[in-house]
Amino acid sequence: MTGDCIFLPLGPTMFATAKIDSLTLKALDRSLAIIEFTRDGQILRANANFLKVVGYGPDEVRGQHHRIFVDPDYAAGPEYQNFWKRLASKD
């Protein structure tokens, strides 16, 4: 490791952290079910693995709130509401 960069010898060249991060993210995207939210619970993106598990298409979830994945009674309850309030208030 040199400074803030991690270098891996790959043949005659070395790749910096940004390249490793990109490769790692691509590998994770291929092998895990991943969904991204805003801090208030709006769905920004879900990868193909996630969509396959939940049985939705990308246009069916993008822009929706996380509550589409939970029981309506739970979503209406204080625990769920407070979770999103706490998350939205983080800097």
Image (spheres, helix red, strand yellow):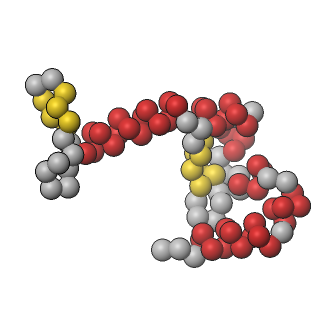
* Residue found at x 68% / y 69%: 83
Q: Position of residue 88 (x, y in %)?
A: 59, 71
State left or right for residue 28 relative to residue 48: left
Q: Position of residue 86 (x, y in %)?
A: 63, 74
25, 44: nearer the viewer: 25
Residue 88 lies, with reference to residue 1, above or below; the image says below
* Residue found at x 55% / y 36%: 32
Residue 52: image quadrant is top right
Q: Position of residue 48 (x, y in %)?
A: 60, 32
* Residue found at x 49% / y 35%: 29
13, 37: nearer the viewer: 13
Residue 46 can be seen in this image: yes
State left or right for residue 74 relative to residue 6: right
Q: Position of residue 28 (x, y in %)?
A: 47, 37
Residue 21 lies, with reference to residue 84, above or below; the image says above
Spot the residue most to the right.
73
